[in-house]
Image: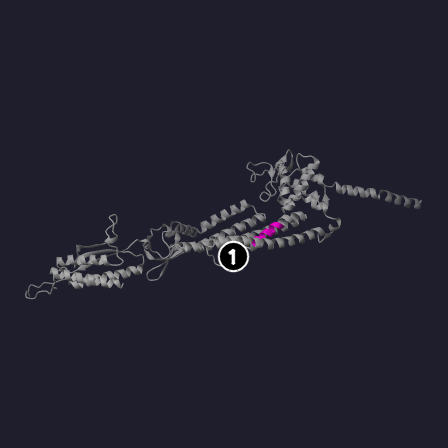
Amino acid sequence: MKPVIKLSIKQIYYKYFWFFTWVVLSLNTTAQVVDLTTPRSTLFTHIDNLKPDNYHPEAAAKTIYGLSLNEAKKKAIRLKYIFEGKGLLINYNDIPNNPDYIDSINFPIPKQAYKPFPYRLPEVYLEKYGSNWYYSKNTISKIDFLYHQIYPLGAEIISQYIPTYLKDEILGLAFWQWLGLFLALLITYFLHILFKKIVYGILHFIKQQVTQFPIENLDERLKQFSHPLSYIFGIYVLKLIIPYLLLGQKLSNWILSSLNFAEIIFWIFVFLKFVDVFIAVYKHKVQKTPNLLDDQLIPILKNSLKGLVIIVGAFKTLIILGADPKAIIAGASIGGLAVGLAAQDTVKNLIGTLMIFIDKPFKIGDWIIVNGIEGSVEEVGFRSSMIRAADTSIFKIPNSKLSEAAVNNLGKRIYRRYKTTLGIRYDTPPELIEIFVEGIKQIIELHPTTRNYSNYTPNNSAPYNVEFVDYGDSSLNILLNVYFMTKDYAEEMHGRHILLLGILELANGLGVEFAFPSQTLFMELFPEKQPSYPKYNTDKTFVKKTLDEIIVEFKTKIIKY
């Protein structure tokens, strides 16, 4: 009986071995369950059923709404190729698992829909039809267009025509994929060299057309442009080739994200160099203008533009890393509000700086009076401006106050006014006063830098004033009001020197004495003691001759000035 039993076990083993093996394989093949109840389960059904080790296109096709099985399979496969070609990696933990999920952010009208990649692939989204979630009808209509954008030659062609001996895996990738990576890098390198020469040639041609702007180290700057632009071109070529290598979502995501990051870095470098060239051209232009405030704007404009380039580059980098642009903008707004509240004075000063450069109430070197401070403008910075007083001390005035204050810009005067009073003795004869006033007027007319009647028009105020105007406490007061035709302080002082010296010589020649505070005391007990008064010669001939001689002498003297 024992041998019979052993034979029966062997027979059963050999008879049902392949049956059990088929059952296990069949169970493994049909183990995938199609679940379309939530956005997460629908995406999982689509992607998981198209994995190389779990390839069930019929199950993945269930996520495509309203098409036949063959058409749905084709769309599902192409959609997965689109995800891989763009390097999009699905994180199921971030996908809502709510059957009644409603998206109120990415759609004008909130509806039961979900966008897996709202910023990098907004055309693709899920939508609920009935009780299940599918890829939307709008998505299905755009799959072929998106697919041909990434794979103009078709991704299936490559996988179909790869020889079998090149499909052996080495370190997780097929041999043909390693070979493709090597050829892609080699092709990119040679195209980079070629494109660099082309770009340099184009930039050199542009240089010859704009030679009226002499830019320092222009040839070196052109090379600095051509290098990053050629790298960007190489990155673009790689981004076209990589999808055809079918590297899978994880590896494609890592490579394409790295390439996108490198592309942003190179673009930042290009725009920073462009800012340098722009500032060089702007500097050449403003150096031809007399307004020195434009020169002061150069470092501020340069730093502002470079800061803007870096901020935009950082913003783009965060989006590539998966950050929500709306969240970034909202965070920046809230952060900016917090910083603004904490640094109100700094913000006010920055706005004041902007207003100064827009209104241009003064320029570098102008002599101004503001809030009781008088001096020359030396620098306009981000926060404050430097005013150097006459004693060479420095005042730093916040730009917010400077932009709001009443600024008396003496540097913008057409003429520099000089007003004083000449006090002569009370015993000066009227005839000498008249001749003295007339002589001063002639000196002003002959003066090389004073305004006179030769440039006077009826629409202007009188070019100068010399008049006997007042009886002072100890003098007869003659008003002297003149205008020097210069904007330079030192030149004005020299003009005053010539004018006052001429008036002094005129007074000495005519015998006119300047008064000083004094009192005369008369004593009745000593009538024989009479006070001593100067003797004035009022002879018309003498006075006229003396005046003519003084004027001729003044004419001779001013030639050397």
Q: Main secondary structure of the magenta part?
A: helix
Q: Residue furthest top?
A: 130
Q: Is residue 70 left or right of residue 513?
A: right
Which quadrant is home to the N terminus?
top right
- Viewer-proximal residue among 246 and 30: 246
Residue 231 in magenta stretch: yes
The x and y percentages for residue 401 are 37, 52
The x and y percentages for residue 70 are 70, 37
The x and y percentages for residue 357 are 40, 51
- Residue 265 visible to the viewer: no
Which quadrant is home to the C terminus?
bottom left
- Viewer-proximal residue among 495 and 253: 495
- Viewer-proximal residue among 196 and 394: 196
The residue under the point 51% across, 51% down is 311
Look at the image and give the residue range highlighted in magenta: 228-237
Residue 525 in magenta stretch: no
Q: Is residue 9 left or right of residue 367?
A: right
The residue under the point 49% across, 49% down is 335
Residue at which label 1 appears:
221
Amino acid at circle 1: Arg
The residue under the point 57% across, 53% down is 198
